[in-house]
Image (cartoon, rainbow, N blue to C red):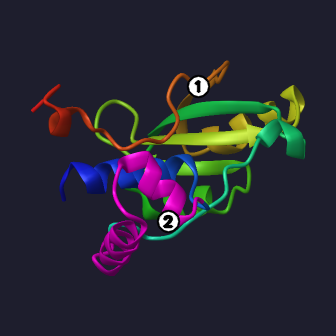
């Protein structure tokens, strides 16, 4: 994995539908070289798929939040299985630290957020933060390649 692979991954995160020619211009390689690199990254399992970015507000889910959950019983698989079934949860991560789980969710209204919080709280202590804006979307960290980090 070199700096061109990382730049290519970053460009694909920005626009997964970009043509090889567009990607080539962006990272200063030829289109055939980009095509070969993409194929290798897919074959190696680095690129696991492509997905659309969705503006949640435009599909009627303007309230986005982050929910931290400290489970009543740490590692309770039944709780994880139930959390997966909640459709408002868009991401769910088992983490180290005080909360056991950190989730992202999107809802249509404050009453729907309250219902979601009540549903999640049955598994333990929860803390919810409403997302006001996002300074950083998903990206590939390039710092250590460019000499800005280790």
Image quadrant of residue 39? Answer: bottom left
In this view, the residue in front, 30 or 83, is 30
In this view, the residue in front, 80 or 6, is 6
Residue sitting at x 67%, y 18%: 132
In the rendered image of this protein, does residue 90 appear above or below residue 39?
above
Magenta-tinted stretch: 18-45
Task: Residue 44: say if magenta.
Answer: yes
Residue topped by disc 2: 20
Residue 5: percent from the left, percent from the top? 28, 57
**7 left or right of 147 in image:** right
Image quadrant of residue 104? Answer: top right
In the rendered image of this protein, does residue 72 appear above or below residue 1?
above
Judged from the image, the secondary structure of the residue bearing numbered disc 2 is: helix
**80 left or right of 17 in image:** left
Q: Main secondary structure of the magenta part?
A: helix
**91 left or right of 47 in image:** right
Q: Taking the image as drawn, is residue 70 in sight? A: yes
Residue sitting at x 78%, y 30%: 63
Q: Residue furthest left?
A: 150
Can you say which quadrant of the picture contains the N terminus?
Answer: bottom left
Residue topped by disc 1: 134
């Amino acid at each position: 994995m070199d700096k061109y692979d990382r730049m290519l991954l970053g460009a694909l995160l920005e626009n997964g539908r970009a043509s090889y020619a567009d990607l080539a211009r962006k990272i200063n390689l030829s289109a055939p070289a980009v095509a070969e690199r993409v194929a290798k990254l897919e074959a190696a399992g680095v690129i696991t798929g492509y997905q659309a970015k969705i503006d949640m507000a435009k599909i009627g889910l303007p309230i986005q939040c982050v929910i931290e959950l400290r489970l009543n019983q740490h590692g309770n698989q039944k709780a994880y299985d139930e959390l997966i079934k909640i459709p408002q949860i868009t991401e769910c991560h088992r983490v180290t630290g005080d909360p056991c789980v950190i989730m992202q969710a999107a809802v249509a209204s404050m009453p729907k957020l309250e219902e979601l919080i009540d549903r999640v709280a049955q598994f333990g202590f929860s803390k919810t933060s409403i997302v006001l804006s996002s300074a950083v979307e998903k990206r590939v960290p390039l710092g250590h390649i460019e000499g800005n980090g280790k």
